Image (cartoon, rainbow, N blue to C red):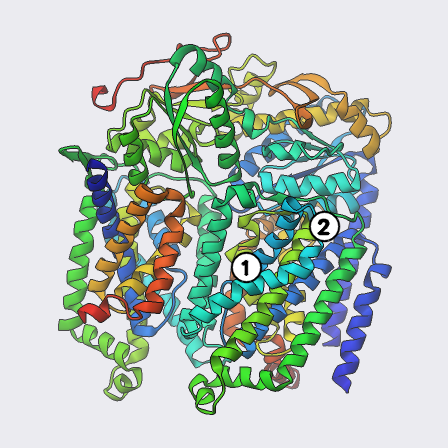
């Protein structure tokens, strides 16, 4: 029983972090249909910002307030100068933008490697390994906090999209870009803001992940893959879906590791991904309608 | 377009000319081709090895070189990919006409590179690439200074046999060449020691959360947890073991990640009392080991580790062979390498054949333990500079 | 007619290449180039002509390579049989996948191919007993000389291009393009789009698998990270396709040549030119530059991806009129 409960707790807590990674992706994919294969790499950049600030004695939770604006800006620049121009060029294959994000991901990784070398860095804090026990079940405090922050961001995004002007414009662009243009929405500007927001959110995930994990130039890739699975699972553009998607993936990985083998961690994720694409296109969003 | 094409040809001509030119200039020196990952994920170790090769070359050339000729090191970047490693070796052999090759960090690159060397009949003295099969293919032009992965835990085995005497063990390993082959051989060692392996689980490097795996281990309650992990996975495993209050009699790392300073930096106090197999320690009773360690630290303001020592020793072995070779041709250098018998900072080097292996160096290994934040050699007794701490206190008994 | 002449001329030059150039290093680069011609042409058929962009070419490449390698380790037959069998193994992987996943469109299909490759890579890693896991498969290459490999690669490149040339100029080819341009319209015209997508994928998988088997024979070593690599195989295949020209028969050849050359240029610091200049001139700045170029060759590769997509989204052959126009305009301006 302890094994089952501990696995459940581990899966849910990890899922919270995954959700935060997924929210940014779901916005970008939902609004612009852009498949961002540089998502994990953007998070990696945020983790290095956290690391540098940590060297200067800044707590990772405080560095949220630096990393998020910084990545928002970086995201805006990428969209403005690298992705938006692609929409105007006449090409045979629309998938060019996917490849473009792959290139951006490579460039980000290599620039970071150029500066910091292929060295493993740590952001160790007092609470990195802090736990409390409930019976025999251990709860990680750092992951617990990140879970709460993930929920908070989701709620904030939810109301931002529903209540504010920019939020409404973003949703309008997501629903029908041409109609949005006709209604006077500056869609070019909206796409820039959306990519910035998505990058900012994944930066938050990076700041929260850094203390419990480690920092390395190549860690982006696997998180990009997970972000996808979460987005597909939760449904494009659905912030609430991202939470469900994140937790589902977290649980699937954890139970897989405990009851099958940790070897299959990645295969489980990929299989869920293909199954959802085939049998539940639209993800959880289709079931919940949010 | 035609001007563009002319330009391309011109550039090619210049490049070709330069290469021929460099051959003429280099007639005075002895070339040694070295293949290392200087960029990409493994660049860190490539750099440590490169620096150590350069240190050794400076020393050898400072003392007048080999038979009056200076050593010239030709580094080629294999970027950690076998096909690139292969073309790098081909370039060294067919363009630079090197009489001897050394280096080779990752096993996959080394496997591909040594096959080329064997084909062209140019001796390759492998520095690191630890996959067993590299010296099991019957290549007569391939030598290896590093012990094969399966022999890393030799000191662990005697320690378990004489001190710990565990009954059950769990083996966790990274799904890499090193992890898969050395976990397999440790399982065989366990059978010989009559230790019951209750679980053997692989994982893919870079995992975030080992808690489900460790929860399972906890429920099996083994005496020994043996882990073959790279540095950051090693650290996460220990940190999360602490979080879960997982208390086997002892944790042992199978070399690689557990001895690096980054492991301790990331794992913090969770690294305390962890044992690890080690190939080389600066306190080892080898001539020049300590001097090499201090010199490296002084020159590069960084600590070196066993990969560096291997590289440093490799060049001495190669230089020794070049000195004894009748002529500087691949064939004669190969014959000279085969009769190597010398002491280096990495230990005694002699290429012997046993079991399926050919031209393989055999060196003893060590057991180290993290004690109060520093890595101490604790086994075998003859070289131990600190007494091992065993039994290890449980997590909640520690301060 | 002129086109045919150019093609024959190129073939003749390639056929005489190893007789003229004795340097193994260049021969090696040429073999890589020819291998990429095969892979690039195959990618171009499924992505460039049929519009189903594959981000998982490595899945087929790896299947072919493993088919060849496993033949020699398990059945003790020559890995050369892999050339015959590897392609079919790749088709056997590709067709069921296509049958299931072709109901997805555009970018989602691309992601599914990515997932296929990941699954195969992990499977090959975990199935230690069968594939050797990360230990990989090591065979002794059958020839010391590069010439036999060169001609095998040349033959494969020629046949793959011929077969693809033939297919795209026959009826299926027009169906492929119609699927790319507008799948719904194609369907409403009565084209069995699912079948033709499968056909296109089947041919592409076949040639990619054959290239994988060639890789196994030539390199003598494979492991899951090498042959199922996202960056080194799948992305490289896309780049070869895009740089040369999407939806053109000769594009992949141009792309393969450029990509192999560029990769080697960056890796070797322009064939050691920069380093040499630094030594000759004694200039520290050049030395630093040489270190930076070789140190950042992946960065250069990444920047190249970004620039190519921004400037030449349809590749050199595809955007040739555009290039010629801008060059021409520059000349008149001068």
Mark 2 vs 1: CB contact within 8 A:
no
Residue at numbered disc 1: C58
Front-lying residue, B61 or B292: B292
For this view, does C117 lie left or right of residue A210? Answer: right
Q: Which mark is residue A116?
A: none
Gap between marks 2 and 1 measured at Cα: 23 Å
Tag 1, which chain?
C
Can residue A200 be seen here? The reply is no
Image location of residue C115, percent across then percent down: 43, 60
Tag 2, which chain?
C
Q: In which quarter of the image is the N terminus of chain A?
A: top left
For this view, does B27 lie left or right of residue A247? Answer: right
Give SS at disc 1. Answer: helix
Q: Quadrant of the C terminus of chain A?
A: bottom left
Give SS at disc 2. Answer: loop
As drawn, which residue projects farthest toward the bottom?
C189
For this view, does A290 lie left or right of residue B133? Answer: left
Image location of residue B345, percent across then percent down: 61, 19
Classify B303 as above or below B177. above
Residue at numbered disc 2: C78
**Residue depth check, mark 2 versus mark 1: number of the one nearer the observer:** 2
For this view, does A267 lie left or right of residue C76? Answer: left
As drawn, which residue projects farthest toward the top?
B382
Front-lying residue, A7 or B325: A7
Q: How crowded is mark 2: few (under 14 residues within 10 Å), some or many (20 or more)?
A: some
């Amino acid at each position: 029983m302890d094994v089952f409960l501990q696995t459940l707790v581990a899966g849910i807590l990890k899922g919270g972090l995954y959700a935060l990674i997924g929210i940014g992706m779901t916005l970008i994919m939902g609004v612009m249909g852009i498949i961002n294969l540089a998502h994990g790499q953007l998070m990696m950049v945020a983790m290095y910002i956290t690391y540098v600030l940590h060297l200067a004695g800044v707590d990772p939770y405080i560095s949220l307030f630096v990393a998020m604006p910084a990545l928002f800006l970086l995201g805006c620049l990428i969209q403005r100068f690298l992705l938006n121009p692609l929409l105007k060029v006449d090409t045979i294959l629309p998938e060019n933008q996917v490849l473009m994000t792959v290139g951006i991901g490579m460039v980000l990784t290599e620039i970071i490697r150029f500066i910091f070398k292929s060295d493993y860095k740590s952001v160790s804090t007092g609470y990195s390994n802090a736990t409390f026990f409930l019976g025999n079940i251990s709860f990680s405090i750092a992951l617990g906090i990140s879970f709460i922050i993930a929920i908070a961001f989701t709620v904030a995004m939810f109301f931002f999209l529903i209540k504010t002007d920019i939020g409404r414009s973003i949703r309008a662009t997501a629903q029908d870009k041409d109609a949005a243009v006709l209604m006077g929405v500056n869609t070019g500007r909206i796409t820039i803001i959306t990519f910035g927001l998505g990058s900012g959110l994944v930066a938050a995930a990076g700041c929260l992940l850094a203390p419990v994990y480690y920092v390395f130039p190549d860690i982006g890739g696997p998180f990009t893959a997970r972000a996808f699975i979460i987005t597909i699972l939760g449904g494009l553009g659905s912030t609430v879906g991202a939470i469900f998607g994140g937790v589902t993936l977290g649980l699937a990985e954890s139970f897989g590791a405990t009851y099958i083998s940790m070897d299959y961690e990645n295969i489980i994720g990929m299989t869920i991904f293909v199954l959802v694409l085939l049998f539940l296109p639209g993800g959880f969003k289709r079931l919940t309608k949010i | 377009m035609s001007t563009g094409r002319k330009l391309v040809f011109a550039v090619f001509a210049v490049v070709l000319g330069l290469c021929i030119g460099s051959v003429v200039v280099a007639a005075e020196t002895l070339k040694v081709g070295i293949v290392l990952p200087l960029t990409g994920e493994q660049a860190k170790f490539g750099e440590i090895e490169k620096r150590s090769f350069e240190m050794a070359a400076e020393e050898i050339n400072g003392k007048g070189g080999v038979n009056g000729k200076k050593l010239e090191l030709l580094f080629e970047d294999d970027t950690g990919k076998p096909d690139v490693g292969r073309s790098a070796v081909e370039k060294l052999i067919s363009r630079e006409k090197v009489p001897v090759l050394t280096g080779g960090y990752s096993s996959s690159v080394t496997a591909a590179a040594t096959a080329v060397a064997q084909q062209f009949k140019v001796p390759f003295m492998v520095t690191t690439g630890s996959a067993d099969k590299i010296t099991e293919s019957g290549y007569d032009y391939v030598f290896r200074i590093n012990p094969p992965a399966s022999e890393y835990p030799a000191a662990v085995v005697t320690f378990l046999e004489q001190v710990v005497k565990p009954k059950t063990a769990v083996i966790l390993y990274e799904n890499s060449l090193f992890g898969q082959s050395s976990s397999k051989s440790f399982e065989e060692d366990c059978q010989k020691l009559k230790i019951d392996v209750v679980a053997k689980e692989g994982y893919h490097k870079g995992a975030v959360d080992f808690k489900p795996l460790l929860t399972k281990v906890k429920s099996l309650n083994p005496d020994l947890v043996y882990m073959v992990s790279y540095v950051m996975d090693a650290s996460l495993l220990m940190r999360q073991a602490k979080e879960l209050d997982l208390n086997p009699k002892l944790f042992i790392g199978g070399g690689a990640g557990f001895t690096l300073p980054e492991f301790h930096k990331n794992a913090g106090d969770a690294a305390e009392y962890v044992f690890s197999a080690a190939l080389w320690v600066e306190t080892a009773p080898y001539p020049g080991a300590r001097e090499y360690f201090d010199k490296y630290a002084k020159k590069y303001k960084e600590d070196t580790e066993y990969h560096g020592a291997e590289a440093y020793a490799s060049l001495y072995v190669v230089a020794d062979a070049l000195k004894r070779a009748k002529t500087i041709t691949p064939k004669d250098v190969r014959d000279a390498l085969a009769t190597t018998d010398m002491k280096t900072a990495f230990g005694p080097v002699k290429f012997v054949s046993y079991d399926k292996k050919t031209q393989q160096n055999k060196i003893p290994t060590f057991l180290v333990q993290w004690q109060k934040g520093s890595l101490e050699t604790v086994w075998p007794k003859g070289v131990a500079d600190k007494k091992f701490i065993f039994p290890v206190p449980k997590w909640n008994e520690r301060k | 007619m002129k086109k045919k002449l150019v093609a024959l001329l190129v073939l003749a030059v390639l056929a005489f290449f190893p007789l003229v150039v004795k340097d193994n290093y260049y021969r090696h680069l040429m073999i890589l180039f020819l291998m990429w011609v095969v892979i690039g042409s195959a990618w171009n058929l499924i992505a460039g002509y049929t519009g189903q962009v594959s981000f998982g070419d490595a899945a087929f490449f790896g299947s072919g390579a493993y088919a060849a390698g496993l033949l020699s380790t398990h059945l003790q037959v020559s890995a050369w049989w892999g050339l015959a069998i590897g392609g079919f193994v790749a088709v056997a992987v590709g067709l069921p996948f296509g049958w299931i996943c072709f109901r997805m469109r555009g970018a989602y299909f691309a992601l599914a191919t990515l997932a296929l490759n990941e699954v195969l890579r992990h499977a090959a890693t975990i199935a230690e007993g069968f594939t050797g896991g990360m230990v990989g498969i090591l065979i002794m290459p059958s020839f010391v000389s590069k010439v036999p490999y060169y001609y095998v690669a040349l033959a494969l490149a020629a046949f793959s291009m011929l077969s693809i040339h033939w297919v795209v100029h026959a009826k299926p080819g027009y169906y492929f393009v119609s699927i790319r341009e507008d799948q719904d319209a194609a369907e409403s015209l009565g084209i069995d789009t699912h079948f033709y997508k499968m056909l296109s994928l089947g041919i592409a998988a076949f040639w990619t698998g054959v290239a994988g088997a060639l890789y196994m024979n030539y390199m003598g070593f494979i492991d899951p990270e090498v042959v199922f690599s996202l960056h080194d195989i799948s992305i490289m295949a896309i780049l070869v396709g895009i740089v040369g020209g999407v939806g053109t028969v000769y594009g992949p050849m141009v792309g393969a040549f450029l990509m192999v050359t560029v990769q080697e240029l960056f890796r070797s610091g322009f064939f050691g030119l920069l380093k040499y200049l630094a030594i000759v001139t004694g200039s520290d700045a050049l030395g630093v530059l040489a270190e930076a170029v070789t140190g950042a060759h992946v960065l250069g590769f990444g920047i190249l991806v970004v620039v190519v997509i921004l400037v030449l989204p349809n590749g050199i052959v595809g955007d040739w009129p555009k290039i010629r126009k801008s060059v021409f305009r520059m000349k008149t301006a001068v």
